[in-house]
Every structure is written in structure tokens, then in C-alpha cells.
Amino acid sequence: MQAIEVTAKTLDEAKKSAAQKLGVGVESVDVTVLEETKGLFGKTTVRVKAQVIEQPAVAAAAPVQETPAPVGEVADVTPAPKPAARRGRGPKAPVVSKPEAGEEEPAAVAVAVVEESEPEVKATAEDAEKLAALLKDIVASADLEVTVNATEVSGRYVNLELDGKDVAYLVGKHGEVLNALQYLVNIIGNRRIANGVRATLDGNDYRKRREDTLTTLAQNIADQVKKRGEEAVLDALPAFERRIVHKALSTVTGITTYSEGEEPNRRVVIAPA
């Protein structure tokens, strides 16, 4: 039974949103609360796992027969529909060999959509200034020659660019330091701003190069999935990198993508449509 994750302001809103995405009535959805966050001024956010309640099989009435069936023989009935079975994965296609250290997750009924449905949030120039100031304070405490600039505001995301001779220290091997720093900024920023705005950090164009790598990899694996007719599972990726994969394959015909598992081991699955 396929499950999806939904984030909303209240449990009722999350359940209604999940029912809409799964294409069923609210009474047919079972939800499990995964996380409930309380922010400033009583603002709450609830993240749930939702799945369709499996209905008991109901046998159709057997056709009227002139001659009764022999004792011990079951009359012909129509079997109840079975939940859609997962495709056999077989041998995995090549996966991301070294995922980076660290969302809207696409529902199973949608194709390559944004991860984990969340209330719409729009970052402002003021949010960008606050997050940039926060990152500047952290960098200053490390005594590194690095400048911080807010380069773009897109939806709920504020892009912060690191520059300077010491920026390599804040990127680290395979972007591990950059990811950890981004996580720290978002944890602190969530407590100070508490409006759902998120920061994305980049230095030495690492994110751009990483996006190009993931996009190429996703397209190559999608080609293999279509040829073999078998789904492939990538190694665990942080939410913002999973979004890159979903976006890269959103226009590829014959392919569907979704995510499974719990953080930090959540993985993108590329499967035949």
C-alpha cells in the first residue's frame, strides 16, 4: 500500500490534503503523525504519513446454477481488487556513489512533482537579510575570510552565496561542510523567523556543479529503467537534492519518480510509468 507524506497547519488539513492527492474520501485515509512543530505565537506545523485504508474484500454473488456445486467445491466468485504490487526491482541500476550529507515528496499518484506538499510560503527581501546576517555571524565566529550575499529569492527559498579565499573550507569534501552549515542556518533561522522560509547555501559554484551531476545521472538511469522495465533506487539524498532528480525527470515520458523511506535515509525511486 503506497503511503505519502503531507505537511499542513493542522491534522485535519493534512488529512484533507492527503485524501485529495490520493483521490479518495477523507474517511478512507489513515494518517500517522510523524512530526508536530510549534513555533512562535502558537503557530504549528504537522507532518503526517497518509495511506488509503485497505477495504475488506467482498466476494461477488455467484451466478445461479441449475445444478448445485458438489459438496466441498467453492462456487465461482469475482476476486476482490488487490493493492497494486510494486514492480520487481531486480538488479539495481547504478546509484549515487557518494550522496551528500544533509522534502515536497511526490505522491505516488503524481509524476515527478515537488517533494512533500507544504503550505505555500513566500520568502521576502527582509527574510533574505535576516538569513544573510545569521550566516555572516557564524562565518565571523570562525575567523574566515568569507563574504555572504543573498543572490536570489525564489518561493520559500533564499539563496546565499559564499565567496572569498577561505570559502573552500566551508564547502568541504563532497559538500559535506556546506550541507551541515546549511542545516545549521535553517535550524536557527526556523526558530528566529518561524515562517517556513529556508536558506540554500553555495560556494565556488558547488551547487551548480552538483545539480549538473545529479541531472545527468538521473537521465542516464531513467534511460536504463525504460530499457529494462525495472525500477532503480538511488542512494539516500537530502530533500533539496531529491527535488533536483524529480525536476530533471519531470518531462521524461515513460518514467515516474517518487521517494520512499524516512529521513535521513529517504531515497528517490525511478520507475517505469
Image: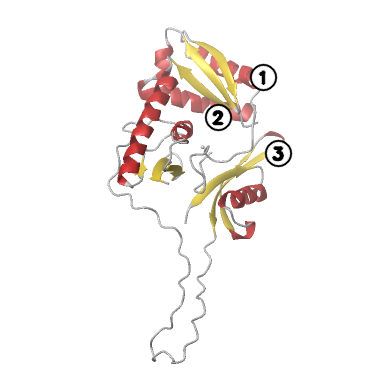
Q: How is the image coloured?
A: secondary structure
From the viewer's perspective, tell me whether residue 72 is left or right of residue 198: left
- Compared to residue 22, the image places residue 78 above or below, namely below
- Dot 2: element: helix
The image position of residue 15, as x and y in percent, is 62, 51
Of residues 74 and 63, the one nearer the viewer is 63
Disc 2 and disc 1: Cα gap in Å?
Answer: 18 Å
Of residues 196 and 43, the one nearer the viewer is 196
Instruction: Report the label total.
Output: 3
- Graded by Cα atoms within 10 Å as few (under 14), some (14 to 19) or many (20 or more), the crowding at tag 3 reads few
Is there CB contact under 8 Å for labels 3 and 1? no
Q: Which callout, 3 or 1, points at the residue further toward the start of the chain?
A: 3
Question: What residue is at 39 percent from the left and 45 percent from the top?
Answer: 271
From the viewer's perspective, tell me whether residue 248 is left or right of residue 192: left
Disc 2 and disc 3: Cα gap in Å?
Answer: 18 Å
The image position of residue 205, as x and y in percent, is 43, 16
Give the number of the disc on residue 187: 2
Residue beneath label 3, please?
Answer: 42
- Dot 1: element: helix
- Dot 3: element: helix
What kind of residue is marked 3?
Answer: Gly
What kind of residue is marked 2?
Answer: Ile
Disc 3 and disc 1: Cα gap in Å?
Answer: 22 Å
The image position of residue 122, as x and y in percent, is 65, 28
Q: Which callout, 2 or 3, points at the residue further toward the start of the chain?
A: 3
What kind of residue is marked 1?
Answer: Glu
The image position of residue 252, as x and y in percent, is 43, 37
Question: What residue is at 52 percent from the left and 45 percent from the top?
Answer: 110
Of residues 35 and 84, the one nearer the viewer is 84
